[in-house]
Image: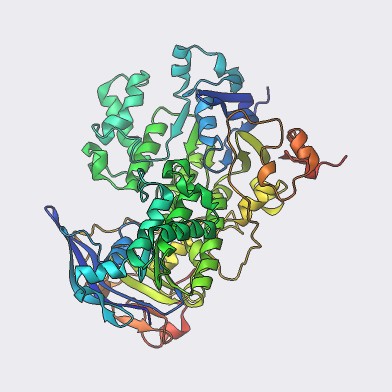
Amino acid sequence: MTLEINNLVVEYRTPDGVVHALNGMDLQLEKGMTLGLVGETGAGKTTTALSILRLVPNPPGVIADGNIKLNGEEILKKSERQMDEIRGKVVSMIFQDPMTSLNPVLTVEDQIAEVIERHEDVSYKESYKKAREMLEMVGIPGSRGSDYPHQFSGGMKQRAVIAIALACNPELLIADEPTTALDVTIQAQVLEMMKSLREKNKMSMLMITHDLGIVAEICDTVSVIYAGRVVEHGTLKDVFDNTRHPYTEGLFNSLPNLTNRKAKLKPIKGLMPDPIHLPAGCSFHPRCNYATEICAKERPEKVFRTERHFTECHLYNEENIIKGGVIKR
Amino acid sequence: MNEHLLLEVNGLKKYFQTKRGMLHAVDDVSFTIERGKTLGIVGESGCGKSTLGRAILRLLEPTAGQVFFEGEDIAKLSKEQMRRKRKEMQIIFQDPFSSLNPRKTISETIAEPLRLNGIINDRKKRMEKVLETMEIVGLAERLINTYPHELDGGRRQRIGIARALAPGPKFIVCDEPVSALDVSIQAQILNLMKELQESLGLTYMFITHDLSVVNHFSDDIAVMYLGRIIEKASSEELFTNPLHPYTKALLSAIPVPNIHMKMERILLKGEVSSPIEPPDMCRFAVRCNHCMEKCKASEPPLTEASRGHFVSCYLNRQE
């Protein structure tokens, strides 16, 4: 197993109150697999990613509880120096916005070579040679390496960011909404490229996205998160064909149906809860069409449908989770 | 003049002078929209879709062309006449974070067009109208004195819609109204806009890059590429029978949230070419998988391939 997160609690302690970003997050990602982390704004997707790299800004962010194990080793106990060896080498991250994650005063090859020089025992010259190879690998002519970021288009910038992330052959790649800022045809190119690089480098991937279409395309397993907790997790087939949690159902129902354009959208009522004042019990209960009294009082436990597919919802017990049919899609 | 037509755009052009030459943002675009219908405008960044929306409302002055609104060429109106016309033609902007004045409360924002256009001059009556509009778009009365920064994206976009609705328009340009919102909120706003269209008989021009949204929302769709409409048909027809190679690639690139439907993906080469002084050839030719000699010799005109289905591509011409 490459990555295992257990009961992770992250808080941002602000003058307005404590923002409960993650409230007992559990994640499992096996070697060579791709896990999709799906949720809306404020669900805790990016905080999860930053926690893995120990980049949660402190203050105000505090990792209050839980553990993060990378290849069995506890990340939260590492020294800052040990983290430097991990970041960019063992775990790399592609940030959401390629427009702002590149340094505007350095050339693109400078920024790729920087990672290589830092982590690998190579000469200055070799690092630049490798930087240009990386550019070629993501489909940009190596000679463009001497350009500055503003000379690149959006799609090329995102490719350059991917080249930086992959320069040292990481075991785990965290991609935080890597294609959100791109046009669909360019998104298709970038996703296709990420798929083939993943296979070539045999890496594990944590794909953070709000787009269930991208999940269907590139992921093996999915964790649906809401208010800092995983509410449903399983393989693609489990979550897409045997949806159990009402929130997951709501996400699917909110999407326009491509095959039946007359179908009315069924949005989830209400809004994401304020992370400073999370509702008691199940955080989703004020927006849930199936909520009962207990939902406002007690946080639901995990109920397993199969060994790997579970949901956290009071609707289910060991019997009816197998049968399904409690919610309607 | 056809009674059913609300808007007719004829040969509309919007060029921008840049250091490197003339940028053809919108280049000879023509279309019509019937009353109570929605025309979707789809395309990628830089294809000119937002410029088109703004040029129609004369928020940007068109370089050439005519825009007939209920039979009247509004491109010829004086500034003052146009300002009065705008209460019938409104726009909803993409970003609910930057399109609202941070120093105005919700009620001030919604009341402003009513005041400026002298639609309701009595202060008390104006507030009544504001409250009525807020109710229509689903904003609670208690929010009346809040500022935009206190509200989430979904509510802010409702303010944007309320502001556009308040003057009682017939036509609204919706420029990516849901792109900045989460899916669950996006569905709420799309449903609201659809209900408003039915109850108030509104006509929409819906600009977006999201193909599944445009398919759900529009009656007809026009696909733009580098300032031109390259294909136009009813939504049903366009999605079942796309003709232009660009439309085909665009449709195949949508990630489908269904694990049993695997699309055969058409990957395009390269990226959009420059809109600055484009040569007289098919603007898509350099990325096209079916590019022929004549595609590089001249630009294919927009012709009717089947009833109501227009395409500008030499591949589909029977000669």
> Which percent across, then down, holds residue A172?
39, 71
> Which percent across, then down, holds residue B156?
33, 42
Residue visible at 44% across and 24% down in the picture: B87
Q: Is residue A327 above or below residue B106?
A: below
Q: How many marks?
A: 0
- Horizontally, is B312 left or right of A97 in the view? right
Classify the position of the N terminus of chain A by image quarter. Answer: bottom left
- Horizontally, is B132 left or right of B243 in the view? left
> Which percent across, then down, holds residue A222?
43, 72
- Residue B256 visible in rendering: no
Q: Farthest residue toward the right?
A: B319
Q: Is residue B187 above or below residue A290?
A: above
Which is more toward the observer, B201 or B110? B110
- Horizontally, is A326 left or right of A278 in the view? right
Q: Is residue B132 above or below residue A230?
A: above
Residue visible at 30% across and 26% down in the picture: B126
Please say which color scheme the image uses. rainbow
When asked about the image quadrant of residue B142, the answer is top left
Which is more toward the observer, A226 or B255? B255
Residue visible at 40% across and 73% down in the picture: A171
Q: Is residue B87 above or below residue A243?
A: above
- Residue A87 visible in rendering: yes
> Which percent across, then down, holds residue A100?
36, 47
Residue visible at 68% across and 25% down in the picture: B2
